[in-house]
Image (spheres, grey):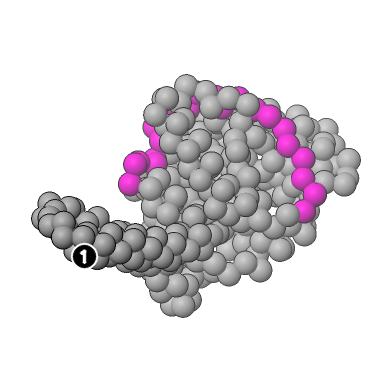
């Protein structure tokens, strides 16, 4: 078993992968107390030459690197799961390949873990860097909503973490197919310590996350950690019943008072509001049914097609 493993998911990173990995390797080699380590790079079905660079250039140059290729693009969360399944070390660090997670922080995280008493060393964002105001606002809004619904505080959280072996083993017992790494690692608990970092400029690449994929991740994470939206559907139904009862009483009073009951536009408006609420409620229920459907199929989270240090296999 190695002392430390670094899990790095990559997707279409041919332009920066060599620079990123060489930078991370240089930082690891500067850590005097670190006797042995392994870099586990998970290629999440890249369509460019990322895999070729990993297999033909980086792996032959560094025996510490193990490159694993998934059979298609399963998503970053699945790629992280693959890395954690494969990692065989006393401590495992998860980080991105674009150098926005500063490799210079690895030494500090490793020393904190070596001192003992801490199972997770998590890097939290002191600043979000050059992120647009809209992206920053939506991220903060999501984490505020997620925290309120689930009770798990992810303010300024990132995927950049060091996890002790027993944390990784506990992670591997979680069977979910709809994975939200930040939320699940926070949900597990354990003793943890935070270190701050400033998000660096993205190194020679653009974000692989688009608006649709971010919305999908947000829906998955909320559905995986909270049933509150389902309770909101019930509360909305109760509210409409109360409103309908009050409106019915007013209509009855007006009728016996001899006041003409009018309001065709009001009736149409109420029908539209109620109809829209029903459709939204059905959509919320549908989201939860979709998550249940994904879980009961029991398909693996990912499929491995190539591994520079093992035969191709299926992992879940």
The residue depicted at 48 percent of the width and 42 percent of the height is 142
Q: Quadrant of the N terminus?
A: bottom right
Q: Residues within 10 Å of mark 1 (few under 14, many from 20)?
A: few
What residue did someone put label 1 on? Answer: 256
Q: Quadrant of the C terminus?
A: bottom right
Numbered disc 1: secondary structure = helix
The number of discs equals 1
The residue depicted at 46 percent of the width and 77 percent of the height is 296
Residue stretch rendered in magenta on the structure: 190-212
Instruction: Please tell me whether residue 162 is drawn above or below residue 23 in the rendered image.
Output: below
Q: Which residue is farthest front?
A: 257
Q: Nearer the viewer, residue 202 or 177?
A: 177
Q: Position of residue 288 (x, y in %)?
A: 42, 67
**Residue 194 appears anywhere in the view:** yes
Q: Position of residue 149 (x, y in %)?
A: 54, 53
The residue depicted at 80 percent of the width and 49 percent of the height is 191
Q: Nearer the viewer, residue 2 or 224?
A: 224
The residue depicted at 82 percent of the width and 38 percent of the height is 112
Instruction: Please tell me whether residue 57 is drawn above or below residue 265 in the rendered image.
Output: above
Q: In the figure, is residue 228 to the left or right of 187?
A: left
Q: Quadrant of residue 58?
A: top right
Q: Quadrant of residue 123?
A: top right
Q: In the figure, is residue 141 to the left or right of 121?
A: left
Q: In the figure, is residue 271 to the left or right of 86?
A: left
User: Is residue 31 located in the magenta-colored stretch of the structure?
Assistant: no
**Residue 305 appears anywhere in the view:** no
Q: Position of residue 222 (x, y in %)?
A: 49, 55
User: Is residue 196 located in the magenta-colored stretch of the structure?
Assistant: yes
Q: Nearer the viewer, residue 26 or 232?
A: 232
Q: Position of residue 258 (x, y in %)?
A: 16, 60
Q: Main secondary structure of the magenta part?
A: loop
């Amino acid at each position: 078993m190695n002392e430390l493993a670094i899990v790095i998911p990559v997707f279409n990173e041919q332009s920066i992968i060599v620079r990123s990995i060489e930078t991370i390797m240089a930082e690891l080699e500067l850590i005097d107390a670190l006797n042995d380590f392994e870099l586990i790079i998970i290629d999440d079905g890249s369509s460019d030459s990322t895999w070729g660079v990993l297999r033909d250039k980086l792996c032959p140059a560094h025996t510490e690197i193990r490159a694993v290729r998934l059979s298609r693009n399963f998503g970053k969360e699945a790629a992280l799961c693959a890395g954690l399944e494969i990692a065989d070390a006393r401590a495992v660090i998860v980080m991105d390949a674009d150098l926005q997670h500063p490799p210079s922080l690895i030494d500090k995280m490793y020393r904190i873990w070596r001192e003992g008493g801490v199972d997770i060393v998590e890097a939290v964002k002191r600043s979000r860097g050059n992120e647009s105001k809209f992206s920053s606002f939506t991220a903060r809004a999501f984490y505020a909503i997620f925290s309120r619904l689930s009770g798990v505080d992810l303010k300024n959280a990132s995927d950049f973490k060091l996890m002790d072996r027993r944390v990784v083993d506990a992670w591997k017992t979680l069977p979910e197919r709809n994975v939200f790494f930040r939320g699940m690692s926070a949900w597990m608990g354990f003793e943890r310590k935070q270190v701050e970092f400033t998000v660096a400029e993205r190194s020679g690449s653009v974000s692989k996350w688009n608006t649709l994929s971010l919305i999908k991740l947000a829906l998955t994470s909320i559905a995986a950690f909270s049933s509150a939206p389902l309770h909101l559907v019930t509360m909305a139904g109760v509210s409409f019943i109360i409103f309908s009862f009050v409106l019915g009483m007013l209509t009855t009073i007006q009728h016996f008072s001899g006041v003409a009951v009018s309001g065709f536009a009001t009736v149409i408006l109420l029908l539209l509001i109620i109809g829209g609420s029903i459709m939204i409620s059905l959509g919320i229920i549908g989201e939860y049914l979709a998550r249940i459907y994904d879980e009961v199929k029991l398909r693996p989270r990912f499929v491995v097609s190539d591994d520079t240090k093992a035969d191709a296999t299926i992992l879940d």
